[in-house]
Amino acid sequence: MDIKKMVRGSLVNASPYIPGKPIEELERELGISNIDKLASNENPCGTPEVAKKAVKDCLDKIYLYPDGESFNFKSVIAKTHNIGYDRVFTGNGSDELLQIVMTAFLEPGDNVISSQYTFTRYGQMAKIAHGEYRQAPMKDGMRYDLEAMAALIDSRTKMIIIANPNNPTGTIVYDKEVRALLDKISDNIVVILDEAYAGFVESAKYPDALKLQAEYPHKPVVMLRSFSKIFGLAGLRVGYGTAHPDIVKYINVVRGPFNINMLAQAAGSASMLEAAEHAQKSKALCSEEKKYLYENYKKLGIHYFESEANFVLIKLADEYDGRLVGDELLRAGIIVRPMKAWGLTDNYMRVTIGTAEQNRRLIRELTRLLGKDARTARVVNGK
Ligand SMILES: Cc1ncc(COP(=O)(O)O)c(C=O)c1O
């Protein structure tokens, strides 16, 4: 078998997405327990009780197929956002929905435009969907530059993807910037607003995607949301989106008939209907803890990018060896996300905002590792 001749040409050199290191893996590798995972932007407040109850209430029914139409869940979403039922679609996490939208729209040779330093899945998915992926440089402050992205548009551009807030930088694009882009581009370019972290945003400059959809009815604007973050359902895989009914029609053609399972539908509905308090608590914790972290990052001489999400991108001073610091944090039982795979140096790390206790432990360990006699300084590392 010559696999390289058999597999699709565009995938020969592709690699799978590498998620944050699981707690179990670190336990196995280092034989330690009491591990804090601050690597995958999960919710330290956990899952709302109403969602857990909804899952338990379903357990006697899981021998049946789920409702392939996801009727109840979609009705709850439509009602919550005060939009038509035919504008809503649901999926096995927003990750699956990104893939579905790309599959529905891309022909071989079409291109997808996004930014440097963004969610790495966009490029992988574009490739899987036969598309070409283009990334524009960022603006200062690690922000998307929508003008630079617009400059990459050509006759084969089918899609623009904006992670808002962006992962891994935590920065947002502003309402006026999205409007300027929409005013400029063709009505035949799909604009995806990937709002996985919308629940944490505090800035008044954040666009209201539903309002944009209403105000730009001729533009194919797709909003994607996730239940993995603010609603703490990452393990169940629940996502949804809103778009023009004509777009939703084709999303329904591409998606699998039972793409969102019964437990996910039930937990998603219950969360949306009854977990506003949990979402509020999660947002407040994140906001409060961000202040603590910023203050302490500053004291430690660690550069940080102000974030509108539940994680912060940090950069250690050049005198430290970020790879060593990351390794030492692992040894101390703290998993953060090294940013090498994003094309940044080892000194950049993305750190999820945890509980107050987890964040204090993180700062304690960083203080130790970056202290005067730290072994993590580059000079000690033979440089
Ligand atoms: C920007 C962004 N979009 C989408 C997703 C996918 O989220 P999920 O599939 O869990 O809904 C993530 C996950 O981390 C993300 O960071």
Image (cartoon, rainbow, N blue to C red):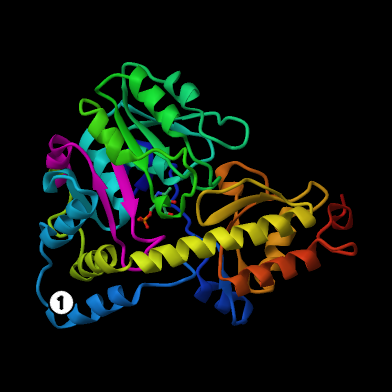
> What element does badge 1 sit on?
loop
Give the total number of marks visible in the rendering. Answer: 1
Does the stretch in magenta take in 114? no
Q: Is residue 294 above or below residue 285?
A: above
Tell me, yes or no, if residue 69 can be seen here.
yes
Decide whether residue 246 is among the magenta residues: yes
Q: Is residue 301 above or below residue 157?
A: below
Task: Give the x, y percent position of residue 373.
Answer: 90, 64
The spot of residue 273 in percent (x, y) is 24, 65
| Residue 35: quarter of image | bottom right
Query: 11 or 136: which is nearer to us?
Result: 136
The magenta segment is 223-252
Name the residue at 16% across, 43% down.
Answer: 87
Q: Quadrant of residue 249?
A: top left
- Residue 188: percent from left, percent from top: 24, 23
Q: In the image, 199: left or right of 218?
A: right
Residue type at tag 1: Ile
Q: In the rendered view, does 382 fall on the left or right side of 104?
A: right
Q: Is residue 107 visible?
A: no
Left or right of 19, for residue 300? right
Residue 232 position (above or below residue 167):
below
For the residue pair 127 and 111, the one nearer the viewer reads as 111
- The residue located at (61%, 82%) in the rendering is 31
Residue at 58%, 72% (x, y): give it. Answer: 36
Residue identifier under label 1: 62
